Image (cartoon, rainbow, N blue to C red):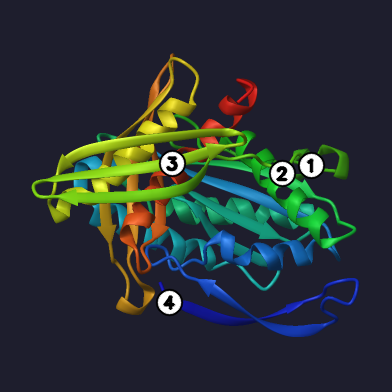
Amino acid sequence: MPSVKFTTLLRMRDGKMANGYRELPWKIDGVTGLPWFTTIHGEMAGRALTQDLHVVDIHLGGLSAVLDAHGAPAFASILREIGRRATDPLDDRDQLSRHTGDRLLLITTRPPAEVARLVEDVVARISAAGVRVDGTTVPRVAVGLARLLRASDYADAAARLDAAILSAEFNAAPVHAADGEQAPAPAPAEAQAVAPEAAPREKRAVLTSLRLDLSGLVATAVVELTFGPRRIVARSVGRNTEGRRLFLIAEATARAVTDLLPSGYGAVIHDVTILQPGAPEQGRGILSSVLFLSPDNEQFLFGLAPAGNDPRLAAARASLSAVNRKIQPLLATSGA
């Protein structure tokens, strides 16, 4: 996916960047038109050196119903409309970005009272872009908030920003009542302030290698994941056709995830789709939908990755992205 350059003012300490301009390569998600959070992470950490930030996690629940009922083009169309509407009330104090398949991140320097009004406005605009599927309106929006206190150095700011995102995700709660009437968004005053001593470093499953072996009518995908000291290798074997290869890679990734998880949990690939809903210069994306199984229930999770020059790698990354934040606390508590 080609990079789009924005000129952004960063105020860094220790002489690393002193009130100067820097060109940052922002990769734009072709589905929503929003930048990926990973490409703006540095700027957000830089802002945390001079002021407090609020991190708002916006979870778009129920989108699997759109995918099942109307297919990937409708799924992409709704996400694109959500991105367009949600950016309308923002200004240069705010940054809305794409995080995973069904999550957006809003990071803002506004004071708490203004954050509350902004979140209510954004949620209302997202809900207005929803559709009715099987008698209910999707997406169902959940919002979580965390406050990031001003940091003393860049490394500290980056670590605490990740901790604030996790805190916002885990505290996300629905902002619409069962009857569809809008309920008030959680007040920023109740958001958790992420202090230096409460800033755990995130530990996630990492894709370390990928291989696709083609032999006549048979294709074999081999994926290796690591989580801390653990190393898991999984494979998937199937028909050697162009339309099947990405699915095999995603399936091998899901099997590796299942091998990492405690007994009773698992991941099953539902579908892998190539999307190009926007202009050609925005590039293609790989959408992976994963059925996540637990002892109590099952749910669909979505991951999206820019295809770039290697759709095979993107299929593995999208599949891992769909489940990574779900499995992280399970792996941590299981002593992995």
Q: Is residue 109 above or below residue 266?
A: below
Q: Are the two marked residues, 2 and 1, in contact with CB atoms closer than 8 angstroms?
A: yes
Rounded to the nearest angstrom, the CA distance separating label 2 from label 4 is: 29 Å
Nearest-to-viewer mark from 3 and 1: 3
Q: Nearer the viewer, residue 323 or 138?
A: 323
Nearest-to-viewer mark from 3 and 4: 3
Q: Nearer the viewer, residue 164 or 321?
A: 321
Identify which amino acid the numbered label 2 is placed on: Ala
Which sits earlier in the primary sequence, circle 4 or circle 1?
A: 4
Q: Are the two marked residues, 3 and 1, in contact with CB atoms closer than 8 angstroms?
A: no
Which sits earlier in the primary sequence, circle 3 or circle 4?
A: 4
Identify which amino acid the numbered label 1 is placed on: Ala
Tell me the crowding category of disc 4: few under 14, some 14 to 19, or many 20 or more residues within 10 angstroms, Cα based.
Answer: some
Quarter containing the N terminus: bottom left
In this figure, which residue is indicated by the disc labeled 1?
A: 199
What secondary structure is marked by label 1? loop
**Place of residue 75 in the rendered image (x, y in percent of width and height, measured from the top left):** 30, 52
Rounded to the nearest angstrom, the CA distance separating label 2 from label 3 is: 26 Å
Q: In percent of the image, x 23 and y 43: which residue is there?
A: 220
Identify which amino acid the numbered label 4 is placed on: Pro
Which sits earlier in the primary sequence, circle 2 or circle 4?
A: 4
In this figure, which residue is indicated by the disc labeled 4?
A: 2
Which sits earlier in the primary sequence, circle 2 or circle 3?
A: 2
Residue found farthest to the front: 215
**Place of residue 4 in the rendered image (x, y in percent of width and height, measured from the top left):** 50, 79
In this figure, which residue is indicated by the disc labeled 3?
A: 224
- In the picture, measured across the screen, residue 187 lies left or right of residue 182, that is right
Q: Nearer the viewer, residue 324 or 107?
A: 324
Tell me the crowding category of disc 2: few under 14, some 14 to 19, or many 20 or more residues within 10 angstroms, Cα based.
Answer: many
In this figure, which residue is indicated by the disc labeled 2?
A: 163
Rounded to the nearest angstrom, the CA distance separating label 3 from label 1 is: 29 Å
